[in-house]
Amino acid sequence: GNLEDLQYRKIDPATLPGRFEALPSCAHVVFNHFAEQHMPDHFGEMVAEADIIDSFNYQSIEDWRSETPGKMIDAAIKLQSEANEQKWPFLRSLIGLLRERPLAEVAATPGVSKRYKTFQQEEEQMLEQIEQEIAFLPQDAEKRVILLDLTRHNRRPQLFKYLSFLLQPQAWAVLEIRNLFRQNVKTNDLSFNMSLSLNLNLQPHQKDIGEIMRSLNIGNGHSGAGSGSVQCASKDEMMRTKARLLQQLYDQFMAQ
């Protein structure tokens, strides 16, 4: 969980059982919890990679797009086109491999490498769709906040919003708006997800997306990313709410 979420709910982390640390990945918290026990040497490498992937803490776009064993495994896990009946056996076998072998050896296995190549093809398709979806508010002349409004889709779109920064590298953030689906049925309820760009994260700034979500009382997050949701009783209410919150999110972000 997020430390900010506990603070928002006025819960002292010290009162909770177990271990709580503000670290880039949950894997790192678990790793520290068991640090006094003997663990294979390659677990440290695995946790370091999880820190980077989970926090999107790359040093440049080139660094983000470079091919590393950790990214190949992450892509194999994120593969969208595979049915659950195929995915679960792969994930179970992957756990065993990661327990016993270094990342480079796991990434070279046929199961990972094949899925990685398929994921690259999926990414190309996602980029093509994102290019059609990208929009900006009329007052955003410098195109600082990418808008991905996916509410027109009757089926849940499978897109990774970070890819939009490859098409609009000058942007500071991406804001994705979706309808929530329940049992694969589209509802009028809305989901808002916002993330800072890699380029902005590499320079000093005062942006805090989690604080924006909390101030609007729709969700939570941390400085680099946040999400929220709103229930809407009708399509008309959904459209009004979407327009209002989109404007408020943009205004607060630019005012920070």
Image: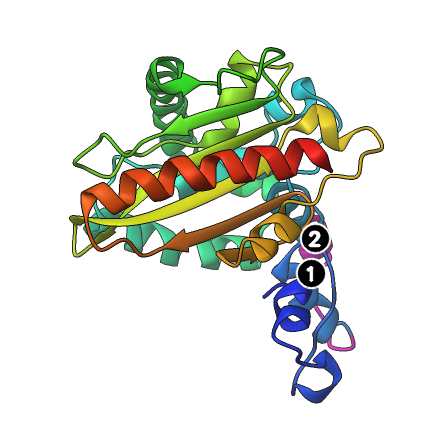
Distance between mark 1 and mark 2 Cα atoms: 7 Å
Q: Mark 1 near mark 2, Cβ–Cβ under 8 Å?
A: yes
Indicate the position of residue 87 as horizontal and vertical percent values.
Answer: 29, 48
User: How would you rate the neighbour count of disc 1 (Cα within 10 Å): few for under 14, some for 14-19, many for 20 or more?
Assistant: many
Indicate the position of residue 184 as horizontal and vertical percent values.
Answer: 16, 50
- The residue carrying mark 1 is 28
Q: Is residue 86 magenta?
A: no
Q: How many marks?
A: 2
Main SS, magenta region, reads loop
Indicate the position of residue 208 as horizontal and vertical percent values.
Answer: 70, 45
- Picture residue at 53% right of the left edge, 39% below the top: 248
Q: Closer to us: mark 1 or mark 2?
A: 2
- The residue carrying mark 2 is 24
Is 133 above or below relative to 235?
above
Amino acid type at circle 2 is: Pro
* Residue closer to the observer: 93 or 17: 17
- Picture residue at 66% right of the left edge, 86% below the top: 16
User: How would you rate the neighbour count of disc 2 (Cα within 10 Å): few for under 14, some for 14-19, many for 20 or more?
Assistant: some
Residue 69 seen in this snapshot = no
Which region shows up in magenta? 36-45
Amino acid type at circle 1 is: His
Indicate the position of residue 144 as horizontal and vertical percent values.
Answer: 62, 20
For residue 237, side relative to residue 225 (left or right):
left
Q: Secondary structure at mark 1?
A: helix
The quadrant of the picture occupied by the N terminus is: bottom right
Q: Which mark is residue 15?
A: none
